[in-house]
Image (cartoon, rainbow, N blue to C red):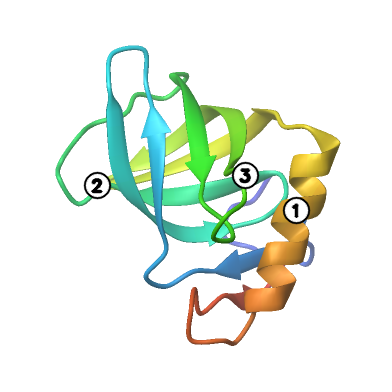
Amino acid sequence: MDTNKTRKYSRRKAFRFSCHEFAIRYRTAYDERDAQLINISTTGCLLRDGKGHELAVGEKILLIFPLWDGTPPVESNGTVVRVRDNDAAIHFKIIEQDAVKNLRLFIFQNQGTGGTSLTQTAK
């Protein structure tokens, strides 16, 4: 495949939404950490860990998304599929259908608001 040609289609399976000032927590096999959510879809997300913690490709983590006050957070098991600098791309491996529904609802309700400043990016 010629990598110099412009791709005319996307391999993405879901829309991504950019996130600003949205903190989440994640657990590795050894500890629990905070990270900044950079973008999210219903199939995965991009995290930024500004503290310099390193994740490895293939590492399994548990993501914890605080959604609304007074409701339990959405949790998802994921696998690190790409790491660049302080950013890690995570593919959701196990996420309950109700969690996907709540995540979608949260994304759409907060799209363009001051809270999480979620904005849709190209798919």
Residue type beneath disc 2? Asp
For image coordinates 57% across by 55% down, the residue present is 70
State the SS at label 1: helix
Q: Residue at x 23, y 31 (%)?
A: 54
Q: Is residue 19 positioned above or below 12 on the image?
A: below
Q: Earlier in the sequence, mark 2 or mark 3?
A: 3
Residue holding disc 2? 85
Identify residue type, mark 1: Asn
Direction from residue 89 to residue 43 in the image, left or right: right
Tell me where residue 73 sits by quadrant.
top right
Q: Residues within 10 Å of mark 3 (few under 14, many from 20)?
A: many
Question: Looking at the picture, how far across and down is residue 83, in whole percent?
Answer: 37, 38
Rendered image quadrant of residue 53: top left
Cα separation between marks 1 and 3:
15 Å
Mark 1–mark 3 contact, CB under 8 Å? no
Residue topped by disc 1: 102
Quarter of the image where the C terminus is located: bottom right
**Nearer to us: label 1 or label 2:** 1
- The answer to whether residue 15 is seen in the rendering is no
- Per the image, the residue denoted by label 3 is 44
Q: CA distance from mark 2 to mark 3?
A: 18 Å
- In this view, the residue farthest toward the left is 51
Between 100 and 15, the one lying in front of the other is 100
For residue 44, side relative to residue 39 (left or right): right
Front residue of 2 and 104: 104
Question: What's the distance in space between the residues labelled 1 and 2, CA to CA?
Answer: 30 Å
| Neighbourhood count class around disc 1 (C-alpha, 10 Å): few under 14, some 14–19, many 20 upward | some
Q: Amino acid at mark 3?
A: Gly
Which numbered disc, 1 or 3, marks the residue that appears first in the sequence?
Answer: 3
